Image (cartoon, rainbow, N blue to C red):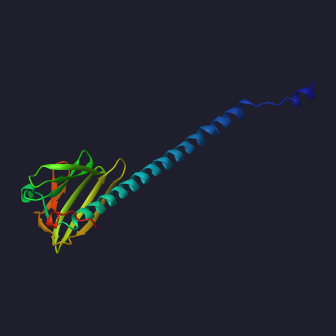
Amino acid sequence: MNKLKLNKKGVSIIEVLLTLAIFAVIIPIIYFIFFVSNNSFEVGKNRGLAQQEARLIADFLNEELRYASVISDEKNNMLEETFYSLEIKDNSIVKKTYSGQGDYGIEDTIVNANCDIELEYEGNRILKGVIRINNQDANYSLDFNIPLENGGNTDIDGQIALNNNETLYYKYPNNEEVTP
């Protein structure tokens, strides 16, 4: 009879409770590590996308405004010739091409980004700008300069803030679009 009692194998209730207690401590720690690393990855990814959007916008603005002969925040200064405008509309930067009568014929969406752009003429043919990207988890700001190659007659008093309310107008010399 003693032989039968010694050969019986099983798990005692204390062993089961001890195992459950260990798992109750380890599982939340593993979940927390996974959750924190996943959040960190998403924040890094969103910040990288915000940086990329800001650089694309800065490059676009540099290409558009660098060779402009006149830059203004008022449409009235441009009505006699072909000119262009930039504005932020529905979280997109929109470029419009106007004829000499002030009617626009072509509207291109350039970049889809939730951003604000501030431009200020600093003198010495330099247009300073700040782009602020307002992304889900990442807000990013990029300062940039645009050297004005054609003298850049600017009619900007102080700053122009391109957001949902403001528009920037510009034209090229001899009514021709300059492509770098």
| Quarter of the figure with the N terminus | top right
Residue 69 in sight: no
Question: Residue pushed farthest top?
Answer: 1
- Relative to 156, say whether 46 is above or below: above
Res 166 visible: yes
**Point 50% across, 44% down: residue:** 35
x and y percent of residue 47 in the render?
A: 39, 54
Query: Which residue is pictured at 46% across the width and 47% down the height?
Result: 39
37 with respect to 153 (left or right): right
Image coordinates for residue 176, horizontal then vertical, percent: 19, 63
Instruction: Pick the residue in front: 116 or 33.
Output: 116
Q: What is the count of numbered marks?
A: 0
For this view, does 98 lie left or right of residue 34? left
Which residue is pictured at 36% across the width and 52% down the height?
138
- Taking the spot 85% from the left edge, 29% from the top edge, the residue there is 8
Left or right, 11 with reference to 146: right
Quadrant of the drawing holding the C terminus: bottom left
Extreme residue in the bottom direction: 124
The answer to whether 73 appears left or right of 109 in the picture is left
- Residue 107: x and y in percent read 22, 49
Where is residue 148 drawn, in percent x and y?
A: 20, 70
